[in-house]
Image (tube, rainbow, N blue to C red):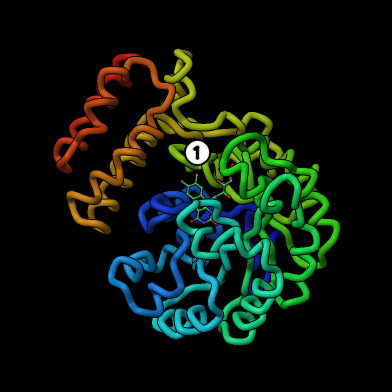
Amino acid sequence: MLSFGDLHLSLPAVLAPMAGISDLPYRTIARRFGCPLAFTEMINARALALRNTKTVKLLESSLIDAPLGVQLLGREPRDFLEALDVLSDYSYSVLDLNAACPVRKVVRKGEGATLLREPDRLFRIIKALVDYSPVPVTVKIRSGWDHRSVNAIEIAKGIADAGACAICVHGRTRSQGYTGRADIEIVQQVKAAVPIPVIASGDILSAMKAVDVLSKTGCDGVMIARGGLGNPWIFRDLTLVLEGDPEASVGDPMKGIKTGDESPAVGDTTDDGHFRGNAVELMETMKDHLSMSIDCHGEKVGVINFRKFFAWYTKGWKNTRSLRPLALKANSAAEMFQFIDKLEEQCSRSS
Ligand SMILES: Cc1cc2nc3c(=O)[nH]c(=O)nc-3n(C[C@H](O)[C@H](O)[C@H](O)COP(=O)(O)O)c2cc1C
């Protein structure tokens, strides 16, 4: 069981912080399929301290959206403490420090992965957060700045000494960005070196991969990032695989339609009574996701934000080549719902 602070998660998997993606609607959808802890996208501590309207919006949550991890980005301890003052008006369960972001405009300001090159500053920030935060503090790191300076083990030991209660390690260097393969050996070495829970991040694209990484690294949990895009049922698959269902790694409920096989019948269940997905479930998920996106962001932004999810949900489908580019230009709720209806028609024709 993945436990830290007073949190005991039912599944050893968490939903990653992802800028422009991990909003309330997406987190809500992931939770529906068993995600036990989700993080906000990275939130700039200075902007939060100043109560910037767009920044505060990133904290939008709900009763269902719990437990919630808030991820902060910054470099000045004072900014983090002022951000914590703002956070005292909000309900959240974990505070995560971003020492992993590789993006140029972030590292140029000395934030994100830059902190891996300034361990003393990193540990000072963590100590300040641990002293001041009302909730457990976790830290997300990369394996190092570049292949010549892989320092995740020393950094992780310092993070544990500074009082953080868990570490998430993305097994790529800052220089790698999101390319190449994540190095699970370094993640395993970090796990062996520290006394606090370690969560593995990088290339967890299916439930089977999650199980493989858990067993190879000995980590306490995995972080689902790109593997959950258009595939929130990865959490349900992982639950089933861990319960011993070897067929649960199907990936998503539309496997049949994507491959041309017969799709599962509506309401199909496994022997142990679990609901196995189907086209109806996928369409409902897309429609609910779109509705929540509109409720959260308003029609214009809600629809624009949903376009990328439409592409992810329908990735690999047969017969959507003409529909996808049109949906990616949809500007109104009516238009986007129509595209989902068209998909539904195509599904019923092909099943
Ligand atoms: C579009 C995108 C946005 C991301 N934003 C954040 C972020 O805000 N904070 C963070 O710590 N990591 C962020 N990440 C990194 C992910 O949390 C994760 O560590 C990384 O994608 C590796 O996992 P994967 O290979 O399974 O995708 C982001 C990744 C992507 C693809």
x and y, in percent, of residue 47 in the image: 38, 72
* Residue where numbered disc 1 is placed: 275
Q: How many marks?
A: 1
x 80%, y 58%: residue: 153
Q: Is residue 346 above or below residue 202?
A: above
Secondary structure found at label 1? loop
Q: Is residue 249 above or below residue 11?
A: above
x 62%, y 73%: residue: 137
Answer with left or right where residue 256 lies relative to residue 222: left
x and y, in percent, of residue 158 in the image: 77, 70
x 59%, y 57%: residue: 100
Instruction: Tell which of 313 and 17 is nearer to you.
Output: 17
x and y, in percent, of residue 327 in the image: 24, 31
Q: Is residue 135 above or below residue 343?
A: below
Q: Quadrant of the N terminus?
A: bottom right
* Residue 322 visible in the current orientation: yes
* Residue 62 visible in the current orientation: no
x and y, in percent, of residue 103 in the image: 50, 51
Outermost residue, right side: 192
Answer with left or right where residue 185 lies relative to residue 56: right
Instruction: Tell which of 190 and 236 is nearer to you.
Output: 190
x 71%, y 51%: residue: 143
Q: Quadrant of the C terminus?
A: top left
Circle 1 Cα neighbour tier, 10 Å, few/some/many (<14 / 14–19 / ≥20): few
Q: Quadrant of residue 44?
A: bottom left
Question: In the rendered structure, which amino acid carries the disc numbered 1?
Answer: Phe
